[in-house]
Image (cartoon, rainbow, N blue to C red):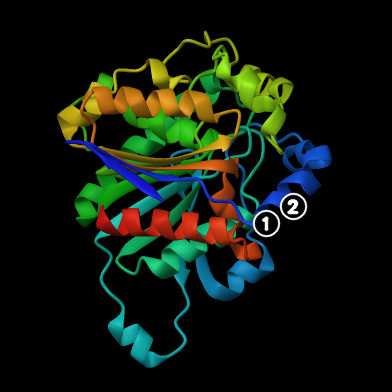
Amino acid sequence: METQSDATLKITKRTDRSAFMFILQHMIKPFGSLLITPRKTHPVGSPRLTAPKKPRTLCDIHERKVGDIYVYDLQPKRLSKSEESREKPKRKRFYYFCGGGWRMPPSGEHWAFCIELARKLPDTAVSVVSYPLAPNNPAPAAFPQLMASYKQLLQDAAQAGERVMLGGDSSGGNIILCLCLALLVEDESAPHPIALMAICPSVDMRKENPDIQKVAPHDPILRIPFINDNAKGWTGDWERSDPRVSPILADVSLLKKKGIACHGVTCSYDILGPDAVLFREKCRDAGVKGQWLAWEKQMHCFPLAWKYGLRESKEGKDWIVDVLRQS
């Protein structure tokens, strides 16, 4: 493990890969794309979610609607009265936007990941945001709804004395970056989060980075036609260069101006990785503070697979927990 730090950015670099992870990547590569293929097309609007049975045994899940968007607050169940007495007041609020190519609701892995965060961060209230899904809800239709709800969430948190953090993986990482940056452009005086956590985010809808082609043979899950099709479905009538869908083209110096930390995870066997690295470097050059985990030979969103006992996934998940705890 190697750590690189400068005045603003701390990058933890890992190069190790377990035999188990090596075998798994080779096993799933022939059908990896099937794991992320939507089973159905979702109608207009924010999907109403039902968590799988196992997460519901670990957490009480409370549904609310903020504007047009469903939000699910996770409250870990305590095993004893002593645990309840030691429970810390919630000083922070973490809103999580799950990935899925802008087309799929949260998976079982997403629910398990978010519940783990809720259990490991006792001073942080964790909530899952159910955003409208493409292709029936492309960004030109969905983004205004998301912006309205995002503003309300920030206002509610400010009134409750909660400091907000935003997190998301893949397409969800794209949305949190776009929402935060778009509101800073629209109104710098508006409430804002203290930190962002972007896990293997999609940051450039143009998909023109030549390094994508170099990574493609190694990626066990994502395929170039798949990410291009997803980008087209979400972008809709907007240009792919619009900062509201391609945050790499936004003015990230606004994050520094407001003191918003931008954290993230990248991996080298992920075709979204090359653009995410460029986004990270853009943040560094603009003086945006943050911590990033850069792990070679790992696959897209690998920390979400922690519940399967994969060492790298567990350690990636723990790294995320530690960074959020420090924020």
Label 2: how many residues lie within 10 Å, few (<14), some (14-19) or many (20+)? Answer: few
* Residue 180 screen position, x and y as percent: 33, 31
Residue drawn at 80 percent across, 48 percent down: 27
Please name the residue shown 45% across and 12% down the image. 242
- Whether pointer 1 and pointer 2 mark residues with C-beta atoms closer than 8 Å, the reply is yes
In terms of secondary structure, where does tag 2 sit? helix
The total number of labels drawn is 2
**As drawn, is 249 to the left or to the right of 161?**
right
Q: Residue furthest right?
A: 30
Residue 86 visible from this viewpoint: yes
Residue 8 at x, y percent in the picture: 20, 36
Residue 154 falls in image quadrant: top left
The residue labelled by disc 2 is: 23
Amino acid at dot 1: Ala
Q: Residue 76: which disc?
A: none
Q: Is residue 38 above or below residue 126?
A: above
Residue 299 position in % (x across, y down) = 61, 42
Picture quadrant of residue 253: top left
Mark 2: amino acid: Ile
Which residue lies at the image location 67% right of the left edge and 63% below the top edge? 52
Residue in front for this viewpoint, 146 or 122: 122
Left or right, 173 with reference to 271: left
User: Is disc 1 placed on a helix, strand or loop?
Assistant: helix
**Hey, which quadrant is residue 284 in on the image?**
top left
Instruction: Provide residue 293's location: percent of width, then percent of height.
Output: 41, 44
Q: Residue at x 21, y 48 (%)?
A: 158
Instruction: Bin the neighbour count of mark 1 within 10 Å (Cα to Cα): few under 14, some 14-19, many 20 and up.
Output: few
The Cα–Cα distance between marks 1 and 2, rounded to whole angstroms, is 6 Å
- In this rendered view, identify the residue nearer to me: 4 or 304: 4
The residue nearer to you, when weighing 267 against 109, is: 267
Numbered mark located on residue 19 in the image: 1
